[in-house]
Amino acid sequence: MTKYVDQGKNDTRSGYGAGMTELGRTNPNVVALCADLVGSLKIQQFIDENPERFFQVGIAEANMMGIAAGLTIGGKIPFTGTFANFSTGRVYDQIRQSIAYSGKNVKICASHAGITLGEDGATHQILEDIGLMKMLPGMVVINPCDFNQTKAATIAIADYEGPVYLRFGRPKVANFTPVDQKFEIGKALMLNEGTDVTIVATGHLVWEALTACENLESQGISAEVINIHTIKPLDSEAVLKSVKKTGCIVTAEEHNYLGGLGESIAGMLANQHPTPQEFVATQDTFGESGTPAQLMEKYGLNNKAIEKAVLKVLKRK
């Protein structure tokens, strides 16, 4: 197995902040908007270096989306920033009408996504956002796995013409991808080649998938691990190539199984290559207050849950 090493835990939201700082220095058209959450989005350095390119909208997320759409008309590349719950559910009408339908070049950047938001509880732990955003025609949906990949994704989407939803999180997690790895929208990354089962993971579950892969190897099970950082457009070719070799698949995500990455893959496979599949995701439920580790354990979103799903799907081959 290819060994990936935790280079030191860091939060993916800080990867976003680092990416914005670099964009501030390299792309004069990039502007940042925020709904009163500068500290949480880690963009203070961008503001300090580019005060004229920052708009503090306050707790008015719907207005922020409208302003961002308007800024694109003058050639600016607006990055909006707030929690994932407020970046999607609260402002869905504005995103649909003013950004997606109009094809505006807005980058919707959403922190504190998923259940690892932790102690703030169910009202803030959105587990439906990937589904909401992937259903919008023309919307690219990206969910990077660590600090380095989030920074790279932030920089990459500035060069993409069209609306993008970039999802990242609050807690410090393993930072293991190469610092200089090129980020290609819509291109999955093979992390470990295997022959018995395909594990496709996104976001915080990628490191958990690699951990599960090592544990499975000790049991004589060869797992192929693929990092799907871009949920839409989906790299169907990479998934198909893998499942045609392994014959079964486990999908893992910090999201409801309804509407998430697993559902996208299931639909694609149903059309092109029906394959036994198990879903590691929340099961049509809201979250609750607790530490990220406690919640990942309770809701079955860790390496142990992935191992269990692998053993189950292998019996269905």
Image (spheres, rainbow, N blue to C red):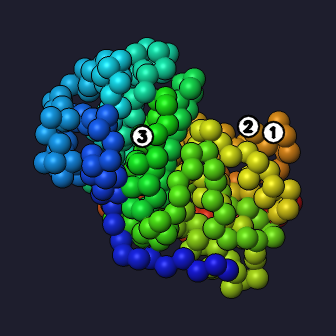
Do the residues bearing badges 2 and 1 touch, measured as CB atoms within 8 Å? yes
Few, some or many residues within 10 Å of mark 3 (<14, 14–19, 20+)? many
Q: Earlier in the sequence, mark 1 or mark 3?
A: 3
Disc 2: which residue: 267
- Asked if disc 1 and disc 3 are in contact, CB closer than 8 Å, the reply is no
Q: Position of residue 32 (x, y in %)?
A: 26, 37
Q: Is residue 289 above or below residue 99?
A: below
Q: What number is the disc on residue 233?
A: none
Foreground pick, 110 / 159: 159
Return the residue at label 3.
158
Tell me if residue 203 can be seen: no
The secondary element bearing badge 2 is classed as helix
Among the 4 quarters of the image, the one containing residue 135: top right
- Residue 270's tag is 1
Foreground of the two, 247 or 288: 247
Lower sequence index among marks 3 and 2: 3
The residue under label 2 is which amino acid type? Gly
- Would residue 98 be found to the left or right of residue 32 on screen? right
Q: Secondary structure at mark 1?
A: helix
Q: Label 2: how many residues lie within 10 Å, few (<14), some (14-19) or many (20+)? A: few
Question: Can you give x and y, in whole percent of width and height, for residue 280 in the image?
Answer: 60, 55
Amino acid bearing label 3: Ala
**Residue drawn at (67%, 80%) of the image:** 1
Q: CA distance from mark 3 to mark 2?
A: 30 Å
Residue 47 in the image, given as x and y percentages of width and height: 16, 44
Viewport quadrant of the C terminus = bottom right
**Type of the residue with mark 1:** Ala
Instruction: Tell me: residue 173, above or below residue 108.
Output: below
Residue displayed at 42% across by 62% down: 148
How many residues crowd around disc 1 within 10 Å: few (fewer than 14), some, or many (20 or more)? few
